[in-house]
């Protein structure tokens, strides 16, 4: 589950990570009131207005602006709220902005120049260990840094048996070229950041930039946070942070119906039971010359209601040219699945794309006969290759 910047900062702050303070606003008037409150509490004279959407690169799309007075706060907030923000991480249509974060200005003058760093905590899947990735090149796309100057990216792997050790946090600060107060502050920052990542059951914490202010404070100016969905039962308060407006509406609907669905860009809809079979089915579609339009696991209860809901989800995608149903009858009998498909087809009326149904397992022969005798425009298959051939034929 992805979070907005302000939500990620709330989590960071709860674990002792110093953050750029801000207040969320949904209207220009609220933005002005937020700016006034920040001025009273922080003394900041300028404010940064940030669009709150689940996408990076907001500044490049015009979603992050500096306001030097209250009139500019109102004008900028009015321009950002309601806009369709297009960034390198959104579609061409962009994402609608419903709220902004009004923050304090932390780039104030002082004894030294502010410096920006990149830092993230994530799982290194090749080693099975959490990893802190960091760089002196903050504020830039880390992909660009990795491609053009890979020697400027450092990593620190954490042994899960002992956690982050003090010398590792100090090594991060040393590699960033810090000394004195800034060195101590960065050591505390890294320690608190890793604790926040670990204890919140997150899959990603990305702070870009981490800022060393002109008076050597270390603060999180941004926060991109993704919580592991499988651990949300331990964090009821985090579940309340979910913003369904930022998610694919079809995936949200599927989740509400108890279906595992991921939207893809292809032309063949998939309805499968079991994640492993679903992945194999997607490979099958690719080998047949098509592209999977979705990942959809209906689970072990493929009754008429679930099948009908799955069909409706798949058909919401206008790019779907065919549907492949691939069910293994282990827990559920194939003839029951076949009856579910027949009932769902009749309930929905005309379906204007070809449907190929492969049922294998308990009572597969009975299920094939039911499909063949149903009089519906549905093609049955028994073997994987047979299903692949039929997909290829309908796409030709």
Image (tube, rainbow, N blue to C red):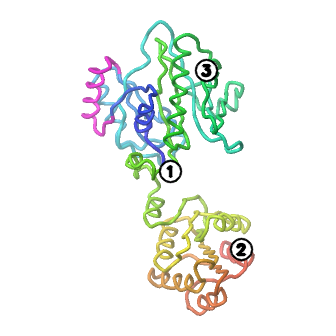
* Closer to the eye: label 2 or 3: 3
Dot 1: element:
helix
Q: Residue at x 54, y 35 (%)?
A: 206
Q: Position of residue 73 (x, y in %)?
A: 31, 27
* Closer to the eye: label 1 or 2: 1
Which residue in the structure is indicated by mark 2? Answer: 388
Dot 3: element:
helix
Q: Position of residue 328 (x, y in %)?
A: 64, 76
3D distance between C-alphas at marks 1 and 3? 30 Å
Dot 2: element:
helix
Q: Position of residue 149 (x, y in %)?
A: 70, 26
Q: Quadrant where the C terminus lies? A: bottom right
Between disc 1 and disc 2, whose residue precedes?
1
Tag of residue 101: none
Between disc 2 and disc 3, whose residue precedes?
3
Q: Position of residue 390 (x, y in %)?
A: 69, 77
Between disc 1 and disc 3, whose residue precedes?
3
Tell me which corner region of the image, top left, top right, bottom left or bottom right, holds residue 123. Answer: top right
Residue 26 falls inside the magenta stretch: yes
Residue density around tag 3, few if under 14, some if 14–19, many if 20 or more, within 10 Å: some
3D distance between C-alphas at marks 2 and 3? 56 Å
Q: Residue farthest to the bottom?
A: 373
Tag of residue 170: 3
Q: Residue at x 47, y 23 (%)?
A: 219
Which residue in the structure is indicated by mark 1? Answer: 231
Residues in magenta? 24-46
């Amino acid at each position: 589950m992805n979070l907005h910047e302000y939500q990620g900062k709330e989590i960071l702050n709860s674990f002792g990570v110093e953050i750029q303070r801000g207040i969320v606003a949904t209207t220009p008037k609220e933005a002005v009131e937020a700016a006034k409150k920040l001025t009273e509490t922080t003394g900041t004279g300028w404010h940064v207005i940030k669009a709150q959407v689940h996408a990076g690169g907001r500044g490049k799309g015009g979603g992050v602006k500096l306001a030097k007075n209250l009139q500019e706060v109102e004008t900028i907030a009015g321009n950002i709220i309601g806009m369709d923000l297009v960034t390198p991480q959104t579609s061409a249509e962009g994402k609608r902005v419903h709220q902004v974060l009004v923050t304090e200005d932390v780039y104030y003058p002082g004894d030294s120049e502010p410096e920006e760093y990149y830092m993230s905590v994530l799982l290194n899947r090749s080693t099975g260990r959490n990893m802190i990735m960091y760089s002196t090149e903050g504020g830039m796309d880390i992909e660009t840094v990795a491609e053009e100057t890979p020697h400027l990216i450092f990593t620190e792997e954490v042994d899960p048996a002992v956690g982050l050790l003090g010398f590792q946090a100090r090594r991060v600060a040393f590699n960033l070229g810090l000394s004195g107060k800034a060195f101590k502050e960065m050591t505390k920052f890294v320690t608190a950041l890793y604790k926040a990542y670990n204890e919140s059951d997150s899959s990603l914490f990305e702070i870009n930039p981490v800022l060393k202010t002109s008076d050597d404070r270390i603060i999180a100016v941004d926060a991109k946070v993704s919580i592991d969905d499988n651990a949300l039962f331990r964090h009821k308060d985090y579940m309340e942070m979910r913003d369904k407006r930022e998610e694919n509406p079809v995936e949200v609907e599927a989740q509400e119906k108890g279906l595992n669905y991921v939207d893809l860009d292809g032309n063949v809809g998939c309805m499968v039971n079991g994640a492993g079979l679903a992945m194999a089915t997607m490979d099958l579609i690719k080998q047949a010359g098509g592209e999977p339009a979705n990942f959809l696991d209906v689970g072990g209860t493929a009754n008429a209601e679930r099948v009908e809901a799955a069909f409706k989800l798949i058909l919401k995608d206008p790019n779907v040219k065919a549907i492949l149903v691939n069910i293994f009858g282990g827990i559920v009998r194939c003839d029951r699945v076949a009856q579910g498909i027949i009932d769902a087809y009749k309930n929905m009326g005309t379906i204007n794309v070809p449907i190929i149904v492969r049922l294998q397992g308990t009572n597969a022969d009975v299920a094939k006969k039911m499909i063949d005798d149903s009089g519906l425009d549905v093609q049955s298959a028994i073997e994987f290759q047979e299903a692949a051939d039929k997909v290829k034929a309908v796409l030709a």
